[in-house]
Image (spheres, grey):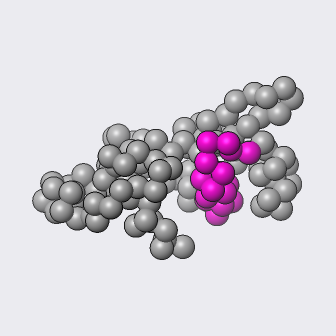
Amino acid sequence: MDKTTATSIFESLSSGVRLDVYRLLVKHGPNGLVAGEIATALNLPPTNLSFHLKAMTHAQLLHVTQEGRFQRYRANLALMQDLIAYLTEECCAGHPEQCFDQAPASGCCDSSSPISLTQTESIP
């Protein structure tokens, strides 16, 4: 990951609505949600949500697939893991393995990532 990509991700997530959307989609894992389900869950008007989903897809935070007349959105978890790795690659003088608990990941994500999901659970 490079600085430009990381900045784009942070800019996209700086909106409270987009952060809520991303966190909701993370909860639903690989199944994701269709746009109407996202709008209902977050009590958002569809036109407002459409704008945010487009921006997040452009920033590569979301994957979208067409299912008939619906679009299913999924969080790009690999991109988020890349962002975490980018942010922590210089941790402990370039030895991030010394900075984090090496407990195995909870099965949702690749356990070879530099941070486990158990460490992020306490983040509000």
Q: Which residues are magenta?
A: 15-33
**Which residue is depicted at the point 67% across and 34% down?**
64
Residue in front for this viewpoint, 51 or 99: 99
Q: Position of residue 18 (x, y in %)?
A: 64, 55
Q: Say whether residue 79 is visible.
A: no
Quadrant the N terminus occupies: top left
Q: Is residue 67 above or below residue 112?
A: above
Instruction: Say if the magenta span includes residue 24.
Output: yes
In the figure, 73 relative to 106: above or below?
above
The front one of 5 and 30 is 30
Q: Is residue 96 left or right of residue 17?
A: left
Image location (x, y in percent) of residue 117? 44, 60
Total marks in image: 0
Q: Which quadrant of the figure contains the C terminus? A: bottom right
Left or right of 70? Residue 105 is left
Q: Which residue is found at the position 70% from the left and 30% from the top? A: 65
User: Where's residue 96, x and y in %?
Assistant: 21, 57
Q: Residue at x 54, y 42 (%)?
A: 76
Taking depth in this image into account, of 7 and 92 the one nearest to the observer is 92
Q: What's the residue at 46%, 41% (across, down)? A: 78
Looking at the rendering, which quadrant does residue 88 occupy?
bottom left
Q: Position of residue 69 (x, y in %)?
A: 86, 29
SS assignment for the magenta stretch, majority: helix
Residue 17 seen by the camera:
yes
Residue 21 within the segment the image draws in magenta: yes
